[in-house]
Amino acid sequence: MTADTAHLLSNLPPQVVQSIRAFRVPDLQAAAQASGQHFLYANLAHIDTKAEALELIGQEFHLPAYFGKNFDALYDCLTTPLARACQQPGFVVVLDQLPVTAKFDKTVREQLLDCFQDAADFWAEQGVAFRCFYSYL
């Protein structure tokens, strides 16, 4: 890990949902690990629908069995149970290769990202960093 990678998170706002842009997934993962934060990753390149996306995110993020596979349930799983469990060190989330399909259109993508923005807002109130990065297929 380079010195730049070690300081990568300190150069970003503590709550952000943004395009991955010039960041590399391995660097974000290394920065999360170096800072003791949770790293959550889902590669959505092979999904076509909202239901498939939520199923994959649930699997990759190890969400509880009761996860209802809708945006409200996703928000709930990203916030309340974790906040009640213990003090959280922070989160670095990567939603890699969001699809652009007829069944996963701009509206669905925006709703998904809004859910992560709402989670970032929740964690801001708790004083916990929550950074979400996304890319498109």
Image: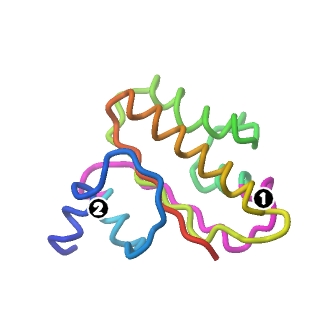
**Residue 106 image position (x, y, % from top left):** 72, 61
Q: As rendered, which of 109 and 70 lies closer to the eye? A: 109
- The image quadrant that residue 101 belongs to is bottom right
Rendered residue at 65%/50% (across/down): 112
Tell me if 89 is positioned left or right of 80 in this view.
left
Rendering quarter of residue 50? bottom right
Residue located 34% across and 36% down the image: 128
Q: Residues within 10 Å of mark 2 (few under 14, many from 20)?
A: many
Q: Position of residue 97 (x, y in %)?
A: 61, 72
Q: Secondary structure at mark 1?
A: helix
Taking the view exactly as shown, the residue that stands out farthest to the top is 84
Say what amino acid the circle numbered 1 marks. Glu
Residue located 72% across and 34% down the image: 66
What is the magenta range? 33-53
- The disc, 2 or 1, on the residue closer to the chain's N-terminal end is 2
- Residue named by callout 2: 31
According to the image, label 1 marks what residue?
52
Q: Quadrant of residue 118?
A: top right
Q: Is residue 102 left or right of residue 116?
A: right
> The C terminus is located in which quarter?
bottom right
**Image spot of residue 135 (x, y percent):** 55, 70
Q: Residue at x 42, y 55 (%)?
A: 39
Q: Is residue 66 magenta?
A: no
Alpha-carbon neighbours of circle 1 within 10 Å: few (<14), some, or many (≥20)?
some
